Structures are given as C-alpha cells and as structure tokens.
C-alpha cells in the first residue's frame, strides 16, 4: 500500500513538472511572437500605420452602431385592457387562428414568439412577433411594467358591447398607461382596439373614442399632474385649457375595430406589422 502511494506521488510530481515545462515553453513562444509583432509594426511607415488604425477604429465604431440599432428594434407587442375584453382570444387568433371557443380568462400572461397565423402561407422569410397578453385584473396589472420597456407597440383592447358600464374603469386604466414614463419617453404607439364589433349591440369605434376622451378629460381635472409618490413616473396628458383628445398625446394613438370570435383581426395585424416589420 505504501509503495502504491509513493508511486502515485512520483507520478504526480512528474506530471506537475511537465506542466511547468509546457507553461515555460508557452511563455517563451508568446514573448517571441510579441517581439516579432513589435518589430513588424515598427517597420510599417507611420502613414500606413495611421490608416490601418483608423480602419480598425471605424470598423469597431460601425459594429457598435449596428449592435445598438438592433437592440432598439423590438418585436414585442403588448395586449392589455380590462378583464373580459377579449385579449386572450385575440392572442390565440394571432397565434393559430383559433378562438378557443369563446371566453377565455387568463390569470397569468400568455406569451409567445411566432409568425402570425395569417402569414404562415407567405413565401420567404417572415419575422416572428413576440406577443404578450397581460391579464386585465387590477391586481395583476403590475406585470405590465415588466414588458413595457421592450414594447414596440401596445394594443389596448375594449369590449365594444359592454363598453358603457366599464367606461370609467377603462379610462382610468388607459390614463395610467398613457402617463407611464416607459410609454411617454419612448413614444410607444398605442392601438385602441374596439373588440366584439360583430355583435349587434356593439358601439362604434368613434363613439368609444369620444367617450374615453371625455372621461380622461374629467380625470385630468381630478388628478394632480405629478404623483407625490413617484414624480418620474407620471406625465400630464393633453393641452392645458383644451378638452382632451388622443391626438394631443406624445405617442401615436390609433383607433380600430376587431372581432376575435369571427377572426376579423386584419386591423390588429396591420398595426403589428407597421411597428414590427416582416
């Protein structure tokens, strides 16, 4: 047993000696390479050396600009709105063309990156879209803040049938959304999507827009322009002394119609492809 241990120690010491010898050889080779490189650079005329340095620096600068541009080019679209407005049905329509048999209530965000179902038959490369369906329940809305910084666009879904009973709640949610720093600073475009317009009792998009503008105008009067809790997170809406209108917002607001149950989502898809190029 003692003989085996002694043999093992000898082998280990020999291995360590070999490793040290290899490291020494590697250091010598690197030093020689460094010396040769220094001599080569010294032989280059100053003018050519300056040009070479300029080319390298320009290439690095261009690479950084391209990386920065790509980082800013987001493919995320956020679906939000009150509970029961039909956001999740729209999510499934965009993903696989199904309505999942009507009402779908989600308590966690539905999230996926995919080519829009209507574009599956297109030839050539089509850019996938990252769609996030954020639950509309008031207790779950803080999850929205996780996705807004990466959003290329926001879709605020309104139930066109049950609009009047919920107009106040929808206006408050929309007001909070349009005064968020992450939305205002980046000027994230917003689509006000009136869903379920296939129903006979559905209100028109013009009626919904005007009612929301009136309610938000009332909220402007009742709320302070800045929050004492977090000054950096709230901005004013509209023009002082004038009635509020969506065209006064810093970010572009578009009003459109859709019907998740009948697969009529062309205006939604148009908005998505306007800000996430195929």
Image: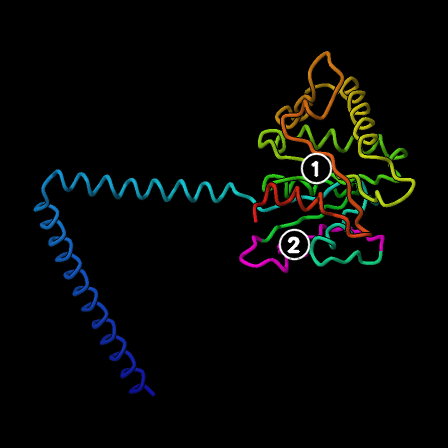
Query: In terms of secondary structure, where does tag 1 sit?
Result: strand
Report the magenta residues as a range: 102-127
| Magenta span includes 116 | yes
Label 1 environment density (alpha carbons within 10 Å; few <14, some 14–19, many ≥20): many
Instruction: Give the residue drawn at x 27%, y 84%.
Output: 7
Q: Earlier in the sequence, mark 2 or mark 1?
A: 2
Up-down: is 245 above or below 182?
Answer: above
- Locate residue 138 relative to residue 116 in the image: left or right: right
| Residue drawn at x 84%, y 42% as measured from the top left | 197
Total count of labels: 2
Please tell me whether the stretch drawn in magenta is mainly helix, strand or loop: loop
Residue 200's image quarter? top right
Which residue is label 2 attached to? 116
Q: Is residue 36 above or below residue 231?
A: below
Quadrant in the rendering for residue 237? top right
Instruction: Quote the CA–CA distance across marks 2 and 1.
Output: 18 Å
Mark 2, secondary structure of its residue: loop
Q: Is residue 253 left or right of residue 31?
A: right
Say which residue appears at 78% left-offset and 21% top-offset. Answer: 217
Which residue bears the numbered disc 1? 191
Q: Position of residue 277 (x, y in %)?
A: 56, 46
Q: Which mark is residue 203?
A: none
**Quarter that holds the N terminus:** bottom left
Image position, residue 247 (x, y; %) = 69, 25
């Amino acid at each position: 047993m003692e003989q085996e241990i002694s043999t093992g120690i000898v082998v280990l010491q020999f291995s360590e000696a070999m490793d040290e010898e290899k490291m020494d050889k590697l250091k010598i080779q690197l030093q020689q390479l460094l010396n040769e490189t220094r001599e080569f650079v010294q032989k280059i005329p100053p003018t050519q050396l300056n040009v070479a340095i300029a080319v390298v620096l320009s290439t690095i600068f261009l690479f950084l600009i391209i990386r920065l541009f790509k980082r800013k080019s987001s493919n995320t679209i956020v679906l939000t709105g009150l509970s029961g407005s039909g956001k999740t049905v729209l999510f499934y329509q965009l993903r696989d063309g199904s309505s999942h048999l009507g009402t779908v209530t989600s308590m966690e965000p539905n999230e996926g990156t995919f080519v829009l179902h209507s574009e599956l038959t297109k030839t050539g490369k089509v850019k996938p879209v990252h769609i996030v369906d954020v639950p509309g329940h008031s207790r779950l809305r803080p999850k929205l803040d996780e996705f807004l910084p990466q959003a290329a666009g926001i879709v605020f879904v309104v139930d066109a049938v049950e609009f009047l009973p919920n107009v106040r709640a929808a206006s408050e949610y929309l007001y909070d959304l349009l005064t968020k720093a992450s939305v205002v600073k980046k000027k994230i475009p917003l689509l006000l999507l009136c869903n379920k317009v296939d129903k006979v009792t559905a209100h028109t998009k013009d009626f919904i827009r005007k009612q929301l503008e009136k309610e938000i105008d009332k909220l402007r009067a009742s709320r302070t322009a800045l929050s004492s809790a977090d000054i950096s997170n709230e901005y004013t809406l509209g023009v002082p002394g004038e009635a509020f209108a969506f065209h006064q917002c810093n970010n572009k607001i578009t009003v459109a119609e859709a019907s998740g149950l009948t697969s009529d989502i062309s205006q939604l898809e148009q908005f998505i492809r306007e800000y996430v190029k195929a």
